[in-house]
Amino acid sequence: MKYALVTGASRGLGRAIAIRLAKDGFYVIVNYNHSEEAARQVLEAIEQSGGCGELMRFDVSDAAAVEAAVEAWEAAHPEEYISVLVNNAGIRQDNILVFMTDEQWHSVLNTTLDGFFYLTRRLVKNMMTHRNGRIVNVSSVSGLKGMPGQCNYSAAKAGIIGASKALAQEVAKRKVTVNVVAPGFIETDMTQDIPLDEIKRVVPLGRIGKPEEVASLVSFLASDESAYITGEVISINGGIG
Ligand code: NAP
């Protein structure tokens, strides 16, 4: 059995990624923070389609919570290790910079960057020991070109790209790959307050993306077939890059 952990898997992209990885044959650890009922439904969907997995609640930006959750999992699975990590959990707290509060700045950076750091540092060690691992980090078109009203989010999503490229070089010799997916506008709770009908007019492919399309890309990057790809950022945005 191969184990994959997906952060922020209770809703949106993480949900679709968890369900897809389970279909690919992974035992999927479904991380969530607040949405327990939604996370349960993800696990049910996995089990109904013949897959298996478990729930793991922690706030990715809380170092002690990450440590406690991973330690408990390892104690319960002494012979196993997590070979696929998808750092997907993320939040938006938009505001133009002149009005941005400390809380808006730090909450967004902490969720994306501290979340990546605490969990990846903890899990990459075992991947290196086993000389096998896939880390996929979810950035955004905002991290590549910046978006007005999103200095915090753009900084976090650009930061995750730099960190991924550095880590990719640190762990390549141990056959661990680190890649980034950078979605454009995808229909989830996060984009509920965005006028998607107007936005799709400026998307060359003429529509908003689906979570399952991002999940399909992550599935490839988590698979054995992607073994020669590392340190890359792959955009999935209908052509708005
Ligand atoms: P979403 O629908 O708002 O879902 C966010 C998920 O992240 C939820 O499952 C939430 O869990 C989890 N989460 C948030 N903070 C967390 C924390 N501190 N610890 C653990 N889990 C946490 O968002 P989404 O659209 O699926 O976005 C997923 C990722 O894709 C994010 O990194 C986002 O920035 C990125 N992205 C999205 C789009 C888009 O258009 N949707 C575009 C580019 C990039 P709980 O509800 O359980 O707290």
Image (spheres, rainbow, N blue to C red):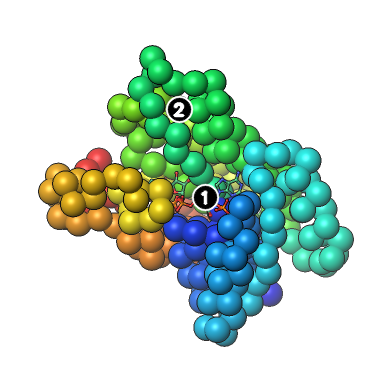
Q: Amino acid at mark 1?
A: Asn
Location of residue 148 with respect to 238 vertically, above or below = above
Residue, disc 1: 88
In which quadrant of the rendered view does residue 82 lie? bottom right
Q: CA distance from mark 2 to mark 1?
A: 17 Å
Q: Name the residue located 20 percent from the left edge and 56 percent from the top edge.
A: 207
Q: Nearer the viewer, residue 181 or 228?
A: 181
Residue 58 screen position, x and y as percent:
69, 50
Look at the numbered disc 2 and say if its residue's Cβ is closer than 8 Å to ligand 1: no
Residue 115 screen position, x and y as percent:
62, 40
Q: Name the residue located 77 percent from the left edge and 53 percent from the top edge.
A: 69
Q: Is residue 184 visible?
A: no
Residue, disc 2: 152
Location of residue 213 with respect to 199 vertically, above or below = below
Q: Amino acid at mark 2?
A: Asn
Q: Which mark is residue 216?
A: none
Q: Is residue 94 visible?
A: yes
Q: Nearer the viewer, residue 232 or 153?
A: 153
Left or right of residue 190, residue 167 in this image: right
Q: Nearer the viewer, mark 2 or mark 1?
A: 2
Residue 169 screen position, x and y as percent:
57, 38
Q: Quadrant of the N terminus?
A: bottom right
Q: Secondary structure at mark 2?
A: helix
Look at the numbered disc 1 and say if its residue's Cβ is closer than 8 Å to ligand 1: yes
Left or right of residue 109, residue 211 in this image: left
Q: Name the residue located 38 percent from the left edge and 65 percent from the top edge.
A: 212
In which quadrant of the rendered view does residue 93 lie? top left
Q: Secondary structure at mark 1?
A: loop
Q: Residues within 10 Å of mark 2 (few under 14, many from 20)?
A: many
Residue 77 screen position, x and y as percent:
82, 66
